Image: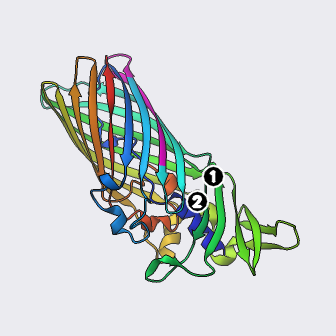
Amino acid sequence: MVQKLVISLAGLLALSAAAAPLDALLTALVPMGYVELGSDHMNQQLDFFNIRDSHLLAAGTQAGDYHGGHLAGGWRFNDNLWLSGSLWQRNLNGLSGNYNFNSWQASGLYRFLDGVGKIPSLALRLSAWGNESKEVSSTNICAAPVANAPKTCQADAFLNSVKITNPSDQTLQADLVGTWNLSSAADISVLLGAGTTELSYGTLTGTTQRNGLLYQFSFIGNDIFGTTADGSSQFRDKASKYGVDVAKELAWRGHFVQAGINAVWRSGPWTWRAGYLFHTVQRDAIDDILASRGWSVLTQIQSITLELNHRFNPRLSAFVRSQLSDKLIFNDLPVAYNTFSSDLFGGRYSIYSFGLRYNW
């Protein structure tokens, strides 16, 4: 039962993705200031990479559908210091329910070397960011599909309900950015970054059936307590009895490094930006647990970000942006990666955004 539970909890967060923090487009040359308001989406019509068809559990469903919005801004306090931040609201479809996440980012960039000729401008960015939800829950969860028939559930593999309160992740990150100003129309930037991530959650509860009785269960550490509504029957288990450590599997820590390159080209009122990012992460405990069970371990992701901006006047512009990755974007939403859900992160994914930007 415990292993079913952990699998189901992972399924609550699987097939989710996010659009921040857009590290692929980092540059050492920043504007005086800006405010950006955008809308972000992924649905069947935008699913150019057929993620639902590439994963049997998601094929023919709305799992992976995403819509949300973001508000971002920044201000250059002097020639070398830049502060920025963003807030994101995300609504997404998982395998067995809809989930809401709020995300945030705060960063400071200091340019310590101005570029001259072949010497690039160099800047250091320090940032903190995270994702959180009040709770994630689902009902009628299939914890163990029939082999070779992922849409057919084994008779004893349903959990009636599962709920996690306050799931969140927090990340601290540092990036070194170098930018060459090739001309008034073109820039090229490279970046190298590293950081640390920590997940947490509040309580873990739900309902399940044993021997024909409906139990309400909860975790206290790795102890599981269950009781019927009338209190006539109880059970108590140790998660370790099943080879499960819930804290390590749902609240892991990790360290990552990343590298990227991007380019900007300007022509009249049009600005094109394109960036590539490679990200690799080493997580404590959870990936060893996954490997010991013969499940997928995903530690690397590659992504491409493309943006087209049209300036209506010196202050106001509109943009469209796409983020394309070879896996679901676990680098931007670490809270969604845990045991079992790692298998669902193996598919390609994309998110599309559009909005307005005001510069000064």
Which of 148/201 is in front?
148
Indicate how the structure is coloured in the image: rainbow
Query: What residue appears at the point 22 percent right and 18 percent down from the top-left corner?
Result: 313
Q: Earlier in the sequence, mark 2 or mark 1?
A: 1
Marks 2 and 1, how far apart in space? 8 Å
Tag 2 and tag 1, C-beta contact below 8 Å: yes
Residue labelled with disc 2 = 250
Considering the whole magenta stretch, tell me its main secondary structure. strand
Horizontal side, residue 94 vs residue 133: left or right: left
Horizontal side, residue 152 vs residue 301: left or right: right
In the picture, the quarter occupied by the N terminus is: bottom right
Instruction: Give the percent coordinates (x, y) of residue 97.
Output: 54, 58
The residue tagged with tag 2: helix, strand or loop? helix
Query: What residue appears at the point 40 percent right and 72 percent down from the top-left corner?
Result: 56
The magenta stretch is 75-91
**Label 1 neighbour load within 10 Å: few <14, some 14-19, many 20+:** some
Query: What residue appears at the point 69 percent right and 77 percent down from the top-left corner?
Result: 241
In the picture, the quarter occupied by the C terminus is: top left
Instruction: Give the percent coordinates (x, y) of residue 233.
Output: 85, 74
Give residue 49's quadrant in the image.
bottom left
Horizontal side, residue 106 vs residue 265: left or right: right
Q: Is residue 84 magenta?
A: yes
Relative to 24, say whether 28 is above or below.
Answer: above
Give residue 187's quadrant in the image.
top left
**Label 2 neighbour load within 10 Å: few <14, some 14-19, many 20+:** many
The residue tagged with tag 1: helix, strand or loop? loop
Which of 330/290 is in front?
330
- What's the amino acid at mark 2? Leu
Instruction: Give the percent coordinates (x, y) of residue 200.
Output: 60, 51
Relative to 195, say whether 97 is above or below.
Answer: below
Residue labelled with disc 1 = 201
